[in-house]
Amino acid sequence: MIDTAKRHREILMYIICGAATTVVSLVVYYLCARFIFDVNDALQLQITNVISWVLSVLFAFVTNKMLVFKSKGLLLKELIMFYGARISTLLIDMFLMYLFVTLCSFDDMFAKCTVSIVVIILNYIFGKKLVFRKEKSDEKV
């Protein structure tokens, strides 16, 4: 019963923190896209996307470590692993944004919201299975 409640709490916290991370990502993207860069230029679109990614990943790391997985692991090791795992989803994000916006001419905000759903799911899997995984002895405590 406790394991089920713990799993539900973790998933609920991940959804809440993931939503907050998505908001951070979208707000930073929007501000850069509307006031700093021209997203009709493929290079500037990617620069905007990367800035949004870097800031949202930092926010996600803090919330995942403290609130979702309640990790007590080494900060620097987990930070490096977290960013490493997120690089793979950044590449997926960048490819899909290029595909949808540059090649298919979809609205950039619609594309960003759609791509964010895919990224959130992949990030949970990577966070749980690679970065903040608990050792067998930790799970029983």
Image: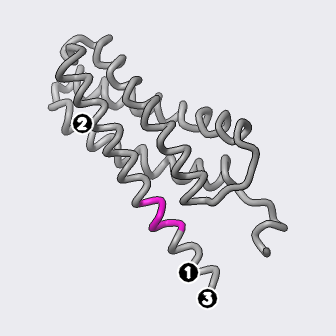
Q: Residue furthest bottom?
A: 1
| Residue kind at label 3, given as amino acid type | Met
Quadrant containing the N terminus in the rendered view: bottom right
Q: Nearer the viewer, mark 1 or mark 2?
A: 1
Query: Which residue is tagged 2?
Result: 111
- CA neighbours of label 2 inside 10 A, class few (<14), some (14 to 19), many (20+): some
Query: Which residue is tagged 1?
Result: 5
Q: Position of residue 76 (x, y in %)?
A: 71, 36
| Residue kind at label 1, given as amino acid type | Ala
Location of residue 50 with respect to 18 vertically, above or below? above
Cα separation between marks 3 and 1: 6 Å
Q: Residue at x 76, y 44 (%)?
A: 74
Magenta region includes residue 14 = yes
- CA neighbours of label 3 inside 10 A, class few (<14), some (14 to 19), many (20+): few
Q: Position of residue 86 (x, y in %)?
A: 54, 36
Q: Which residues are magenta?
A: 10-15
In the image: residue 22, left or right of residue 34: right
Q: Nearer the viewer, residue 93 or 11?
A: 11
In the image: residue 45, left or right of residue 77: left
| Residue kind at label 2, given as amino acid type | Ala
- CA neighbours of label 1 inside 10 A, class few (<14), some (14 to 19), many (20+): few
Among numbered discs 2 and 3, the one appearing first in the sequence: 3
Location of residue 130 with respect to 13 vertically, above or below? above
